[in-house]
Amino acid sequence: MAVNLQGRSFLTLMDFSQEEIRYMLDLAHSLKAKKKDGIVGELLRGKNIVLLFDKTSTRTRCSFEVGAYDEGANVTFLDKNSSQFGKKESVEDSAKVLGRFYDGIEYRGFSQELVEDLARYSGIPVWNGLTDVDHPTQILADMLTMEEYLTKPLNECKVVFCGDIRNNMAYAWMYGCAKMGVDFVAFGPDELEVDPEVLKMARAEAEKTGAKIEVSSDPACVKGADVIYTDVWASMGEEDLIPERVKLLTPYKVTMELIEKTENPEVLFMHCLPAYHDFETQMAATWKEKGYDIREVTDEVFRSNHSVVFDEAENRMHTIKAVMVATMVDPQKIAEDIDARI
């Protein structure tokens, strides 16, 4: 039976089967090839989407806007200063109003419960652009990038996430790997305990797909990795934690020495960006003056042949476009669009 995601929301990869995730990845590969061939799309012609941003973004906003425009949709952007959302109007009421105007809603902010409420009350597809506990669109982009660079299927790969193993990227990776049969290691200090419920949920899913979901503070765990992944040590709003995070996480910085410990000359370095890899940003320079090196990856690794971070960033757009198309368009129309290009 063909996959049909029309009308579905995209809140977490845990809501989707392996077959459905595979469908979105395959669709992303196809839409990327379509764009590279210079074909103007019309799959979303007549559709209107709204982007709600409580957290700032570069890649997520640009990916949704360009992806929508590429296939003919119209886009409205609203941040916390340009609407009554969550201030003079409740989430429920705003969702019901926006559901009358738009065909899809993207939300990027703090609360997973909020994005779930948008989906509950709006009556239209809602897409999670990032919350404090998940980042599903990023994982799709990461897996697309893996498939472009690695010569083996996802279920034969191993991903090691280094550093703050309690953040939304670490949890999103657990969910994605568990669903797709990818071995995953959260490599970080014992003091940062992974949410037991997240771990339990991921491991229960992993039992169905053959994935291994592990947590370790031993650098030996990177051996055999196909992907070394990291993220900033303090998320938005956590800047006051930087001094203690630097002390705690510096041993888990991605260095060329760590890359070599994988014993895999083809290992990929990946990062969701933005990254602190040098001192050219205001943030990194300011903290350096205070005596703190906040870089989670060295410039040597970031600029090395192992690094695929900018291909990964581009793939945010192709995978987000695939999510929008899959959830707003009749699957028969999508199939016809693909067949016309074969």
Image (cartoon, helix red, strand yellow):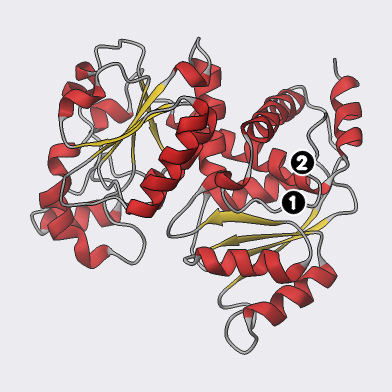
Mark 1: secondary structure = loop
Q: Which residue is drawn at 56% across and 78% down?
A: 81
In the rendered view, does 117 fall on the left or right side of 243? right
User: Residue flagged by tag 2: what amino acid is it?
Assistant: Ala
Using the rendered image of the protein, determine whether residue 186 is visible from the camera's viewpoint: yes
Expressed as whole percent of the image width and height from the top left, the position of residue 199 reads: 37, 46
For the N terminus, give its image quadrant.
top right
Expressed as whole percent of the image width and height from the top left, the position of residue 104 reads: 76, 58
Q: Which residue is drawn at 77% across and 26% down?
A: 34
- Using the image, tell me which numbered label, if any, was put on residue 305: none
Q: Residue at x 43, y 60 (%)?
A: 132
In the rendered view, does 39 fall on the left or right side of 260? right
Q: Which of marks 1 and 2 is in front?
A: 1
Q: What residue is shown with label 2? A: 326
Number of marks drawn: 2
**Which of 81 and 24 lies nearest the eye of the viewer?**
24
Using the rendered image of the protein, determine whether residue 174 is visible from the camera's viewpoint: no
For the C terminus, give its image quadrant.
top right
**Which of 306 and 327 lies nearest the eye of the viewer?**
327
Mark 2: secondary structure = helix
| Distance (Cα) linking label 1 and label 2 | 9 Å
**Residue at the farthest bottom position:** 88
Task: Tell me, yes or no, whether the two marked residues, 1 and 2, touch with CB atoms within 8 Å.
Answer: yes
User: Residue flagged by tag 1: what amino acid is it?
Assistant: Arg
Query: Within the image, what quadrant is residue 66 found in?
Result: top right
Compared with 16, 184 (above or below) is: above
In the rendered view, does 157 fall on the left or right side of 249? right
- Using the image, tell me which numbered label, if any, was put on residue 8: 1
Expressed as whole percent of the image width and height from the top left, the position of residue 49 reads: 76, 59
